[in-house]
Amino acid sequence: MFMDFNKKPTLDQFIQDVAAEEASTRRVMVAAYDLELYPPDVLAVRGKALNSELKISPDGLTDLARLTGIPGDYFLDCDPELQSISFNRRCRQKIPAGRLLQVTTKDEMVVGVQNGNLLAAPRLPILHSISNSIPDAVEKSSVRVIKHAWNGHFDISVISPALTCQPRPGDTVAFGISVAEDTDGAVQVQGAAFRLRCANGAISRTCDGRSHRLRRPPNRTEYQDRFLRTVEAFARDSWRQWTMSAEGVSKLDHMALGLDQRNTLTSRLRQAPFFLSLRVITLILKQLQKESKEREGATLYDVYNAMTYLGSHEEALSHTYRMRLRLGAGEFTRHESRICETCRQLVLKRGGR
């Protein structure tokens, strides 16, 4: 898998690709009352900056649902007529008529609609800030970009093949940073791990006392400059944590997980900091069997791999749950993970970070 990793784009190549993509992307400001949804999946925009009827993508529909307080999954499951009625009515009820919205189009399709009063998370400048954050000891040309989600989302890992550990012989995990955009446009900058053998990714929160969820500031130039400086500072902070993450991953394979402890995982993974559903936990347990079937017994490293596999490859899960799985796996490396000898439960004790 290492050669496949080397075929991933370098950060400079990725920035060039995004620049070309941005050149075909248009963003315009319109008032809320300029929008009307028609079946099937057509958004009419009647503003001065844009006066047209365009197809709208599922991600664009999800944005419309969020703006009007409609559950996204429910809205996408509705038939086009009900979607139209629901959005048009709630748009008039829930969004002030003069509220500015930013409509993003690409290839004559609406791909996003966001609150125009807040700064749009600028992908290209963010990537330049990430590039500036790479430590001097890391060769920039060797850094690779892993896309976990892109169209409709911004969720990537920037990984250095020089920052690695081997929890098992020949099983290399490389480290870097994660950059992701929430559905509301807030940006998260955190540590990242990437298992080269299976192309599985994990996310590690940099510390407990500092949230890396950077909310969008007001839509003004001076705020954008400040926002990007903060992104770069958080990225530098996240790069520095890689040795602690590597130590945490390396310890996991030394923590055996017997059959009785596997049974307790269901209740434990529903609790903080994981908050996983029973359906997702069932998938984890099935994947855990596959991860450990060729070994005499399972370890916490197998649980880590099961979660990162599903978080990286299970496309049937929503992006939110896939990210939650990658974050949950990262929690094993942020804490002193162990199995309690008394209650046989998984215990995550705060580590010295």
Image (tube, helix red, strand yellow):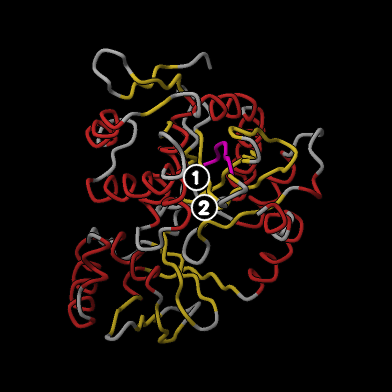
Q: Amino acid at mark 1?
A: Pro
Majority secondary structure in the magenta region: strand
Residue 60 coordinates in the image, percent (x, y):
39, 70
Is residue 176 placed above or below 94 in the rendered structure? above
In the picture, the quarter occupied by the N terminus is bottom right
Q: CA distance from mark 2 to mark 1?
A: 6 Å
Q: Which residue is mark 2?
A: 119
Q: Is 343 or 202 nearer to us in this picture?
A: 343
Q: Residue at x 23, y 78 (%)?
A: 84
Q: Locate residue 233: give its quadrant.
A: top right
Q: Residues within 10 Å of mark 2 (few under 14, many from 20)?
A: many
Magenta-tinted stretch? 188-194
Q: Secondary structure at mark 1?
A: loop
Is residue 63 placed above or below 286 in the rendered structure? below
Residue 123 coordinates in the image, percent (x, y):
60, 56
The answer to whether marks 2 and 1 mark residues whose Cβ atoms lie closer than 8 Å is yes
Residue 217 numbered mark, or none: 1
Q: Amino acid at mark 2?
A: Leu
Task: Tell me, yes or no, whether the highlighted magenta stretch contains residue 352.
Answer: no
Q: Secondary structure at mark 2?
A: loop
Q: Residue at x 22, y 75 (%)?
A: 83
Q: Is 297 or 263 nearer to us in this picture?
A: 297
Residue 81 coordinates in the image, percent (x, y):
19, 83
Q: Residue at x 37, y 29 (%)?
A: 257
Q: Is 165 or 191 nearer to us in this picture?
A: 165
Q: Is 144 or 114 nearer to us in this picture?
A: 144
Is residue 253 placed above or below 17 in the rendered structure? above
Q: Residues within 10 Å of mark 1 (few under 14, many from 20)?
A: some
* Among numbered discs 2 and 1, the one appearing first in the sequence: 2
Residue 77 coordinates in the image, percent (x, y):
22, 71
